[in-house]
């Protein structure tokens, strides 16, 4: 996973119907599952926290369901969505 602020200029994307918001213990994040528009490219998983920080999985997924499963597994493994609230480390 990498964490980046969202970019301003983005290519045209196709969002899965599985894209949406998830809330747990008062923490709401946006879960985006997308790929390049008009393609059969693999799917990308991105989670955006309330402050706008974006966590993007580095490996693509064969299906949008696989991407959503990876999100749910990450939440379960972390014991909640708090892992998505930490800002990325500062690079020097």
Image (tube, grey):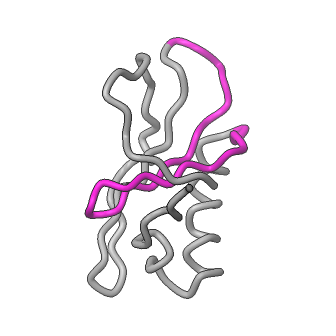
Nearer-the-camera pick, 83 or 70: 83
Asked whether, in this view, residue 15 is left or right of residue 38, the answer is: left
Q: Going 62% across and 60% down the picture, which residue do you hit?
A: 69
Q: How many marks?
A: 0
Residue 36 at what x, y percent from top left?
53, 20
* Dominant secondary structure of the residues highlighted in magenta in the image: loop
In the picture, the quarter occupied by the N terminus is: bottom right
**Is residue 46 part of the magenta span, yes or no?**
yes
Horizontally, residue 45 falls left or right of residue 18, namely: right
Identify whether 57 is placed above or below 89.
Answer: above
- Name which residue lies at 55% across and 48% down: 56
Highlighted range, magenta: 38-62
Farthest top residue in view: 38
Give above or below for 2 relative to 73: above
x, y (%) of residue 35? 54, 28
What residue sits 59% from the left and 52% below the top?
A: 2
């Amino acid at each position: 996973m990498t964490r980046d602020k969202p970019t301003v200029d983005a290519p045209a994307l196709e969002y899965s119907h599985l894209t949406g918001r998830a809330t747990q213990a008062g923490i709401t994040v946006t879960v985006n599952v997308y790929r390049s528009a008009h393609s059969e490219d693999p799917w990308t998983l991105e989670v955006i926290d309330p402050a706008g920080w974006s966590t993007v999985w580095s490996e693509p997924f064969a299906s949008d369901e696989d991407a959503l499963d990876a999100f749910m597994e990450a939440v379960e493994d972390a014991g909640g969505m708090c892992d998505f609230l930490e800002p990325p480390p500062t690079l020097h």
